[in-house]
Amino acid sequence: MTFQQSGAYATTAGTAHRAVPAQQGVPVRAAARRPAPTVRDLREREGRSPRVLAFAAGDTVVVSGLPGSGKSTLIRRTASAAAHRIDSQDARERWDARMPRLLPYALYRPLVRAAHYAGLWRALRSGEGVVVHDCGTQAWVRRWLARDARRRGVALHLVLLDVTADVARAGQQERGRGVSGYAFARHRRAVGRLVRDAEAGRLPVGCASAVLLDRDAAGTLTMIDFPPPPGTSSPSGV
């Protein structure tokens, strides 16, 4: 399975070490001018979905889905060492550890968000691959990432976790942190719109590709990677 934008590709469970990009060497700027973005639906594959999603070095990948759908778990488990992992949950946990236990989160939420977006800004400036947690309701963040990708001559990709509301609520209970009914309804509308648009081939402006995952496909995935171009060394020199 091959993404036609920016040389990114996915490897299946049976051929993880033999897959190569179909359009290796095509410049990102040239690929970004193509009219139709690429959408890959990996849902309902009963364990036969890819183990690796590989994107071009320097690309940005946005992981979106309902609260409790498993975004943070997926990012922590699969984002390679070649990428910056930017998750608002990480920022919240750092601030939770600093604040008095009885202090309501709502009082320091603005500080958490400021820290999260400052970390994202620094990661984008590094020029390396970035995997970003997205709640689905912040369209302005995706517009920002699209502008940044266009400015740097790289590509923006969307990974959508498509799970039911019941599964997402169970995930919230499992982590011991939920959202209000009003907030959850907003998330359902926003994520539902993203999924429906992706199914129809309509992606946010500036987005080069999208991958649709259900819980099974997300569990099969082992890495989101940003390998260097052929003939160059990885950051570790390997």
Image: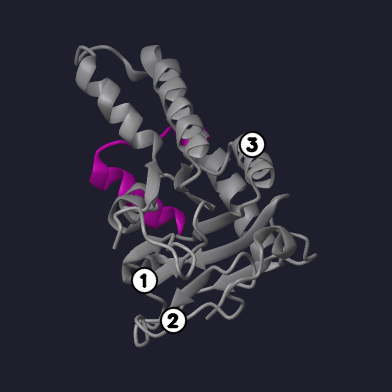
* Residue 171 shown in magenta: yes
Disc 3 is placed on an element classified as helix
Q: Earlier in the sequence, mark 1 or mark 2?
A: 2
Q: Are marks 1 and 3 in contact (CB under 8 Å)?
A: no
x%, y% of residue 99? 24, 14
Relative placement, left or right, of 210 versus 63 is: right
Q: Nearer the viewer, mark 3 or mark 2?
A: 3
Relative placement, left or right, of 198 versus 120 is: right
How many numbered markers are drawn?
Answer: 3
Q: Residue 68: tell me if it is visible.
A: no
x%, y% of residue 16? 36, 81
Q: Earlier in the sequence, mark 1 or mark 3?
A: 3
* Residue 124 shown in magenta: no
Please name the residue that numbered disc 1 is placed on. 216
Q: Are marks 1 and 2 in contact (CB under 8 Å)?
A: yes
Q: Alpha carbon of mark 1 to alpha carbon of mark 3: how far?
A: 31 Å
> Is residue 194 or residue 15 the one in the foreground?
15
Q: Earlier in the sequence, mark 3 or mark 2?
A: 2
Q: Which SS does the magenta portion mostly show?
A: helix
> Is residue 198 or residue 24 the one in the foreground?
24
Amino acid marked by disc 3: Trp
Q: Are marks 3 and 2 in contact (CB under 8 Å)?
A: no
Please name the residue that numbered disc 2 is placed on. 45
Residue at 39%, 22% (x, y): give it: 112
x%, y% of residue 50? 41, 76
Disc 2 is placed on an element classified as loop
Q: Which mark is residue 144?
A: 3
Amino acid marked by disc 2: Arg
